[in-house]
Image (cartoon, grey):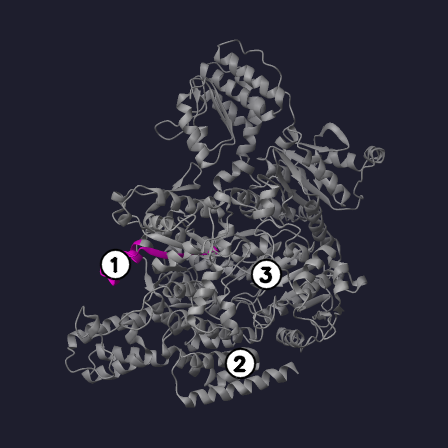
Amino acid sequence: MNADVFIASLIFDYDDVMAVEKLLPHITGPKLLFECALELMAYNEVGTFNMKPNPSGEKAGPPPAVKAILSQFSSGKEEDRVAGYVKLLKFGPDLLQFVPGEKASDLKIWLEAYRYWNQGGATNVQYMFDLLQKSYENQDISKLPTVIITPDIGLLHPLRDNFYFTTPKQFLQWRYSDDCLERATLKGYTLAPKDTPVVAILLYRKHVITDQRYIMDLITLMEENGVCPIPIFINGVEGHTIVRDLLTSAHEIAGVKNGSITRAESYKIDQAVSVDVIVNTIGFPLVGGPAGSMETGRNVAVAEKLLTEMNVPYIVSCPLLLQSIDQWEKNGVLGLQSVVLYSLPELDGAIDTVVLGGLVGDDIALINERVRKLVTRIKGWVELRRTPKKDRKIAIMVYGFPPNVGATGTAALLDVPKSIENILHRMHEDGYDVGDFAHDPDSCGESIIAALGVLSEDSVIRRAKNLSFDDLEKVMGKYMTTKVRKVWAKSGGPGTSSKGDLVISGLQIGNVWIAVQPLLGFEGDPMRLLFQRDLTPHPQYCAHYEFMKLPEEDGGIGAQTVIHLGMHGTVEWLPGQPLGNDHNSWSDKLLGGIPNVYVYAANNPSESILAKRRGYGTLVSYNVPPYGRAGLYLELANLKDLIGEYRTGGSVDLKQPIWSSIIRCGIDTDVPLFITEGDDNSRLKVSDLPESLTSEKFDTWIKQVADYLELLQERLFSSGLHILGSKPSNDDLKSYLSAFFDDALTEKEIIGLQIESQEPDHNEQIVQTAKEIVSLLNRNTEELDGVLNLLDGGYLPPCPGGDLLRDGTSVLPTGRNIHALDPYRMPSTGAWIRGKNIAEETVRQHLEANNGVYPETVACTLWGLDTIKTRGESIAIVLALVGAEPIKEGTGRVVRFDLIPLDELGRPRIDVLASLSGIFRDSFANVVDLLDDMFERCAESNEPIEMNFIRKHTLELAKDGVDRPAARLFSNPPGDYGSMVNEVVGSGDWDNSESLGETWKGRNVFSYGRNEGTGGGISGTARPDVLEKLLTTTERIVQEIDSVEYGLTDIQEYYANTGALKKAAENRKPLDSKTGRKKDVALSVVEAFYSPSESDQNVTVRDVEDVLRLEYRSKLLNPKWRDAMIDQGSGGAYEVSQRMTAMVGWAATANVDNFVFDQAAERYALDDDVARKLQKSNPEAFKNVIRRLLEASGRGMWKTDDDTLDKLRALYSDADDMVEQVRQ
């Protein structure tokens, strides 16, 4: 292709960029590339002016005289750099005419062309073409047509056609004027009343220029629904200057008056107005807009400061510009659109995102119902602020899942009872009505939870009532109620009285209503509704939320906001759109317009995304509990002493006692003793040491045992539970610092930092970091500040989610609105280095264990949480196994995964079964597409099948006529989440371990990726034949663990997903002639929860059984961990109970050593004092502890004696009686 002139705008897609880049060398004349990827912007050229980098990497740019002129268009502030560029477009060409030189003249032509283009409209574009033609033909361009200008910033209203207000104050004065009222009356136009919320609306100027109808429709709908919009259009890059210079709020005005806030010098007091809410309809970051997205998070601190001083809700709510309405309704918000609408604005603390509409052909259309949803949520926040504190109605929702195991009033890492105490006392101090709670010396959180437990079991009503189906229809509407009736017509669902009424229970404490979130299904199938897109919540679940919102005068609670307390509930997981709620999304319906204050663990930025995006949650992060060192205890401590005595010259008679102790501890499995080096069959398994064992060999082995004990005693665990808003004690601070610095600070130095008495004699940087950590941890009290500020309808500053050990001080202080990362920047450079190392070590171990044979398929789990916290290490592992690498474009965004040539790779490409969590699938759709594209290209590459297992398996599947044989990304059905294996294990309703693998397979047959849209398929197409092939060839699985708090044994999800995947693969393996069982599929575990170094080449990859033993010894079987947890009351007892359930799950899907069950029974059931404490604090949790031990014995997982089983059965009977007494 040859052309004289080339013009392009908004080219960002990598494939498009590459295509355009190939064309540009053939262009003989001017090249104008406006607002494109950086690679393309470098091709801008008019005459002698161009933007090509010089050899040093700097852009050629204008001459010094021109630079001096251009510098005058910026305030000097870094955040105003792009906004200054917009001013340059307006005035620069006029000034450049006075600068001599051909280059300045050519730059003027470029600027004039851009000015015409930027102002938009057919006439201006025609003027631009005329300019370029004259320039190309060397005609006189001294007299150019005047640009038809639309102001860079202005305000507009449907009642003032073709008129732009210049300042917010001018607009608001007119809006409240008689002229406005007369115009509205004349046209029959509905205006919002004068006392309604005043809302600043940031609009995209280009849509104003191009007369996009939705702009005026949006203003009209907001007026009709009772808010007064201040509609300010901007170019998109100067949003922060509007907030800084032209807006204020009651909070900022008060702060300026009392001296706590100092306004910027650029603030225009004669032009600004006070607003109640800010709504950004453009998306992107507040600072820099689309241009600000080039360097994600660069100016977050600027936006945070401005919005904190305003202290009003900041909402980003836009029509979709990269998707049609039809696409959204079918698949939700996808790819880059999700980054524009969610990921980037959330870095600024944006909340309550509502999809306002989308593309219909080339036009942008609103969905009126979605605009009404936005207005409802705006009014909810403003009404909250305007209601006096003593009159505000607050609901607090706690959780009670799973049922009948003591889960009522529990949450991950949080002491819910004591946190409720702190909230209620703080509310009382702040002027809220909490009844007699603050004055009654007997009032406590544990009593509230106990009462809620009784209410949830027996349906005793206090401050509630029964609702009929007809009542539900009145408050929820006929459409949604009909859907519920259709699904639940026969069973009626749980929470239904004998008369068929829907029972709602809770405790009323002053104006605070505390309730347990209803279960989602029946006992035995409590999660039936969860993850089922075509189902509905059961009637009582719906009635619970509708009753909570129903005004008091209509017989409801009249809650103006709800606090969901702790991680995590279920409303955000209800059926509906995966991203971008519509009116059929149940979380959207049930939450309505009330603010959702969601208290969430700071270290989980993955699941919190769903709470924020699907559940309209404004997150308030809480800290993780202090870290403890496992140490050594009981037999392990005795073993260390024996080894120490032997190694310091003790008698050889200690050899047999040492060996006997090691056998009792089960450490002979972790550090086996081989009689003959290199001969696996010579492993010693007898109880007596043979005489043939030499002292030299024993001493070498003892050194290995001592190293293992050192590893074990230095293991970290999460000690106890966190109490919302509580400052850490000195001991807690010591634990945090010890875990973070390891050996970098001595105990004396740590104590000195805690009490701030002396200056530690140490590296200054380490000392300053330690002091910063102490200061930030002492700000835990801001967790309650955050809750109370949101109850005031304010703004909560953002903060990245993560934990101190891995992410450092960036995640502190807590009490912040946590967010995730830009999904287009993963894997990071450091994650790529570590991921490659992990993949290489995994392959090395497999070769070593399999006589040098490469694995044909490795299954990798890709979860949202570990992806966010490791910056994409698991993605890097997949790439490295396949033999591919990330390619970045000019802004640092990853745009493609390119295959590494085989001669450079030096080994076969290993096939990968990528098992995606639902959150990863929905939150990292761009990565899913890039991976899918990589697998397709890999399958099509002309390489020998013995060097490319992806191609090998694809050809085999294609030969059998299987569609999309290169599909490799599998997850749950669209809009669904979870394998359901943990629900099955929790209920006990399963026959054998093989069935758990098949449950996993049945839930994960759905293929995702860019190529699922071809051939009539949609993303999320069931492809059981491809999954079957991959499972059959899988020889190893890789799983990362991202935090100390959530190890393999701490939560149900690991065995339910990775363990069940292992079992599914093993189900398809032949019998092992040596064991008589199906051939084992290795599971490699990588603990990735320590602070990483990009240059760190050392990675540790362990087999799952090794990690399980390490975790059980350092946590569940450790009296130090046990006692810290039991001291937390009912919540701590529940944590113990859950780990016993997980132990059964791991025994079913992998292997749990017998000594683990033995010692678990000793520590928790057969220790009278411990059993008494557990039973007292949480009878149902204690009952579950005994139940799981008996279940393990009954299923053949645990071999023990009859006397132990008789004791356990007696304890279970007593526990059952105790539970019944509590219920009565």
Q: Is residue 923 above or below residue 648?
A: above
Q: Amino acid at mark 3?
A: Val
User: Which residue position holds label 3?
Assistant: 599
Residue in front for this viewpoint, 842 or 1125 = 842
CA gap, disc 1 and disc 2: 46 Å
User: Which residue position holds label 1?
Assistant: 847
Residue range corresponding to the magenta coloring: 840-864
Instruction: State which mark lies toward you, 3 or 2.
Output: 2
* Residues packed near mark 2 inside 10 Å, few (<14), some (14 to 19) or many (20 plus): many
Marked residue nearer the N-terminal end (1 or 2): 1
Q: Residue at x 30, y 72 (%)?
A: 670
Q: Residue at x 63, y 76 (%)?
A: 450
Instruction: Please check the rendered image and state whether residue 810 is part of the magenta-colored stretch, yes or no.
Output: no
Q: Residue at x 25, y 79 (%)?
A: 685
Indicate the position of residue 1080 as horizontal and vertical percent values: 33, 67
Indicate the position of residue 538 as horizontal and vertical percent values: 65, 64
Label disc, if present, on residue 1183 of the rendered structure: 2
Instruction: Please check the rendered image and state whether residue 856 is part of the magenta-colored stretch, yes or no.
Output: yes
Label 2's element? Answer: helix
Marked residue nearer the N-terminal end (3 or 2): 3
Q: Residue at x 39, y 88 (%)?
A: 1201
Label 1's element? Answer: helix
Indicate the position of residue 196 as horizontal and vertical percent values: 77, 46
Label disc, if present, on residue 861 of the rendered structure: none
Furthest toward the front, the residue is 960
Q: Is residue 980 visible?
A: yes
